[in-house]
Image: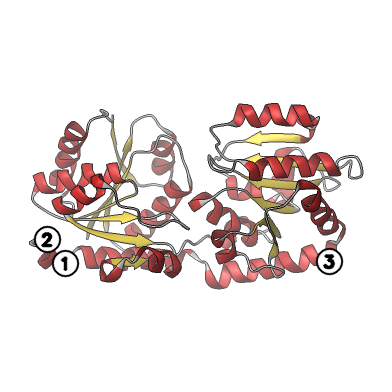
Amino acid sequence: MRTLFYHTASHWSGASRAFAVAARGLAAQGAQVTVVCGAGGGPEERFIAEGLEVVSVQPSGSVGPDAWRLRAVLKEKFIEVVFLHTEREHLVASSAMRLAERGAVIRRIPAGCIASVGRTGTFAGKMATSLLLFSTEADRARSGGGDRSFVAPLGVDVDKVKDARAASRAMLGFTDATQLIVCVIDQQSGSRVTTAMRTLALLAERHPALRLVLVGRADDADDTRMHAAALGVTSLVRFLRENDNTPEVLAAADVGWVAADGDDGAFACLDFMAARVPVIAERTPLVSTYVPDGIAGVLLPPADPSDTASAVARFLADDETRKAMGNAGHTRAKRDFGEKAMIDGFVASTAAAGDRSLWATR
């Protein structure tokens, strides 16, 4: 099957990572795989590093020109199936499919999200055969995807972070004496990041070895830094953007704090568990999907930072519980969330989308 991943985001994210894993997996099974992404952005560099065939394009800001550029790739590569994420990408790809007179489109919905379809998505669905791909059965059920939807559960390579803790700490410049919380953030983290920093401020005096590392991209990073300064914890907080070794960075933690949503949050849960790091997070449907409360971590209700600080202080003081939860999370990640099931989901949806009898119904 000749498959294309259309990804126009300018920054690497959990959604980018999901496409990279799927593209590698499909290519390993003999599929012809092409990635089309924006020129000069982080995703382009990362997809190339993954050994994938990448076609770089310069987005025009207008659907028409972008569709014509994509049409040329579809015809040159004889593409049959296109994976994408956003409604705009859906419209561009569907238009290109119509112009190329071939193929079907699969829109992947990020973990924990529902398939909201606006006017753009509705129009795109009329231009080319369109299927949906979810990360969980619960997401699929909430969206009412029906028989034109599939599930590809997120998965991680557990062996990638095997025994990574010591090297990761050395890379970050921390010793074993440091009590390290690594918090994964994104553009929607908002008050959850604030809670993490206020918790640090409340605990810092009694826990002088406590440090917080924030990993991920947030639009309000400057505000977050200002808030850290206002709380007097700037010297205790380090800001890191997601990079090539994010799973290894997370492996350095004594406690993993998940403040991100969507694919970023889901991958954070799985990366922490794979590295035997117990998880702390506010209880949400997304986090609850991956982290069993009291087994692989502690899920807290949205609360005053003082209440959260008390829970975190008890957690930091109980080495045996943290170790047991870390081991339980590792077992769960290895048993239930490997990359194979994720790739199998992409393969199944690709096979369905490649049914040429559906193309005639566009």
C-alpha gap between disc 3 and disc 2: 57 Å
Question: Disc 1 designates what residue?
Answer: 355
* One can see residue 304 in this view: yes
Q: Position of 288 compared to 43: left or right?
A: right
* Mark earlier in primary sequence (3, 2): 3
As shown in the figure, which amino acid type bears the numbered disc 1? Asp
As shown in the figure, which amino acid type bears the numbered disc 2? Trp
Secondary structure at badge 2 equals helix
Using a 10 Å C-alpha cutoff, classify the residue at mark 1 as few (fewer than 14 neighbours), some (14 to 19) or many (20 or more): some
Secondary structure at badge 1 equals loop
Residue 146 percent across, percent down from the top left: 29, 70
Secondary structure at badge 3 equals helix
Which residue is pictured at 60% across the width and 31% down the height?
A: 221
Q: Nearer the viewer, residue 195 or 2?
A: 195
Which residue is pictured at 39% across the width and 52% down the height?
A: 19
Question: Disc 2 designates what residue?
Answer: 359
Q: Nearer the viewer, residue 8 or 132?
A: 132
